[in-house]
């Protein structure tokens, strides 16, 4: 029997008490369901801090999950313990988890998507810190208001009007059928809406998220001055969150994890986000200066989840010999197109426009990181090595749809000046396709063969 049929047949929702467990009380029993089995497997693998067990979990349940990301967050959280079971059906589970290192509580959701092979989606949201953070409740009127606000923002600003109208009509129809009636707290409602948007929109930049503070009233999504909002905003979903929490990514706030010239004279730069140059230009300059005199360059974007086109252009400026047109961004609501070019002047020495560049990608490489790879590939300036990327080419802005609910709306679409299209839905296709864990070794081998 399929997971979908199980969900239809077993429609009874088992609700637990939502109040916090008294300190020292026994943990709640894990439901004997497919979703409960997945959460148990996730916790066992994650809490073990054993990369082999985490890899086995990912291969069985969530092939797109980054084991490196899981290991990084495991070191920072110290693991998780189940605090409460909030909602359970055979293929859906909502629970609160408590970090072992810090007094932070996370709302964790498991959905079983397929049973042959077994595939799941997990997502987590920080509720807050302290002994017993409260779950923000939501009633029918508030759910209706949030859906109406979401629908209006989509129709006003989403990159494709026909898609926005279709999504909006479907959400309102589902609300009328009572699809969201069991979502009694804002986190559960946000998670449910997110799942619906994935199904209806197939746009990895479109998302609804929960924030643990009350959002001030604000206007509809509009890009801030100087360009569109970061591609991965405060309400993301592009991929399951392996271990959610207020953690600092490797490389600090600017996400430049490593920059060095290796023992064979090859430069290597790994960074995990394209933060805006207003904040992180100095970090980018420092990283690119270190490898300026290398004989070849490897840029590792396998864990890079995107960021601003301004930083894409800033880093690319070190890799060309002259001012170069990289990308355009078209906004449907205004009809305006913004162009992005490399800079005429950047601090420090450039790597330049002649020496070979290899860009490493994975299935998790997303958004601005995809643009960087796509731009250099289109210019024939770099060889892409690794896996096909996630496929998100839209640029977003955020808007409030509830006290704690934030929507991330794609408001601009990328148009490459060479291909006149983008990578939305298809990803960047590598020139040399290998599993992501083999990409660095493969790039170094290709550089060696080139130098013979």
Image: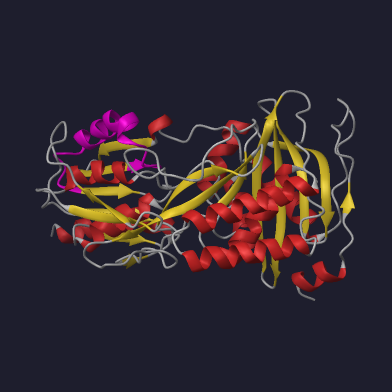
Extent of the magenta region: 270-296
Q: Residue at x 76, y 40 (%)?
A: 96
Q: Is residue 72 magenta?
A: no
- The answer to whether residue 140 is visible is yes
Total tally of numbered discs in the picture: 0
In the picture shown, does residue 149 fall above or below 201? above
- The answer to whether residue 41 is visible is no
Q: Picture coordinates of residue 259 (x, y %)?
A: 29, 37
Q: Is residue 290 magenta?
A: yes
Q: Residue furthest bottom?
A: 1
Is 179 placed left or right of 287 in the picture? right
Q: Residue at x 60, y 37 (%)?
A: 74
Frontmost residue, 179 versus 306: 179
Is 438 placed left or right of 53 in the picture? left
Frontmost residue, 173 versus 361: 173
Q: Quadrant of the N terminus?
A: bottom right
In the picture shown, does residue 398 fall above or below 449? above
In the picture shown, does residue 212 fall above or below 51? above
Frontmost residue, 218 versus 17: 218
Q: Quadrant of the C terminus?
A: bottom left
Q: Picture coordinates of residue 312 (x, y %)?
A: 29, 46
């Amino acid at each position: 029997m399929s997971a979908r049929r199980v969900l239809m047949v077993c429609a009874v929702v088992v609700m637990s008490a939502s109040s916090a467990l008294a300190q020292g009380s026994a943990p709640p029993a894990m439901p004997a369901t497919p979703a409960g089995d997945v959460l148990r497997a996730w916790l066992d693998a994650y809490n073990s801090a054993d990369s082999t067990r985490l890899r086995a979990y990912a291969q069985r349940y969530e092939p797109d999950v980054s084991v490196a990301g899981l290991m990084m967050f495991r070191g920072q959280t110290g693991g998780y313990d189940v605090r409460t079971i909030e909602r359970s059906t055979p293929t859906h589970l909502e629970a609160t988890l408590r970090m072992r290192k810090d007094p932070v509580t996370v709302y964790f959701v498991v959905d079983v998507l397929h049973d042959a092979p077994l595939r799941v989606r997990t997502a987590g949201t920080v509720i807050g810190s302290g002994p017993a953070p409260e779950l923000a409740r939501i009633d029918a009127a508030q759910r209706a208001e949030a859906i109406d606000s979401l629908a209006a923002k989509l129709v006003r600003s989403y990159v494709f009007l026909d898609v926005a109208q279709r999504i909006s009509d479907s959400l309102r129809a589902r609300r009328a059928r009572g699809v969201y009636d069991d979502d009694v707290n804002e986190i559960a409602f946000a998670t449910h809406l997110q799942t619906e948007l994935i199904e209806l929109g197939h746009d990895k930049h479109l998302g609804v998220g929960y924030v643990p503070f009350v959002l001030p009233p604000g206007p509809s999504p509009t890009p801030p001055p100087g360009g569109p909002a970061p591609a991965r905003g405060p309400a993301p979903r592009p991929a399951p969150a392996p271990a959610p929490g207020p953690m600092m990514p490797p490389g600090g706030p600017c996400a430049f994890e490593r920059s060095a010239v290796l023992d064979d004279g090859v430069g290597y730069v790994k960074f995990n986000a394209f933060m805006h140059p207003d904040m992180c230009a100095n970090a980018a300059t420092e990283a690119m200066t270190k490898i300026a005199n290398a004989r070849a360059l490897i840029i590792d974007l396998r864990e890079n989840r995107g960021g601003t086109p301004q930083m894409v252009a800033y880093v690319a400026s070190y890799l060309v010999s002259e001012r170069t047109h990289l990308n355009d961004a078209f906004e449907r609501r205004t009809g305006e197109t913004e162009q992005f070019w490399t800079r005429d002047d950047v601090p420090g020495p450039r790597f330049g426009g002649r020496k070979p560049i290899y860009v490493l990608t994975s299935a998790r490489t997303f958004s601005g990181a995809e643009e960087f790879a796509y731009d250099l590939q289109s210019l024939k300036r770099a060889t892409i090595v690794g896996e096909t990327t996630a496929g998100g080419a839209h640029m977003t802005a955020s808007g409030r749809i509830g006290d704690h609910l934030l929507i991330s709306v794609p408001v601009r679409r990328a148009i490459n000046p060479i291909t006149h299209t983008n990578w939305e839905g298809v990803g960047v296709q590598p020139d040399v396709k290998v599993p992501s864990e083999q990409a660095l070794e493969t790039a170094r081998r290709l550089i060696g063969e080139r130098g013979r």
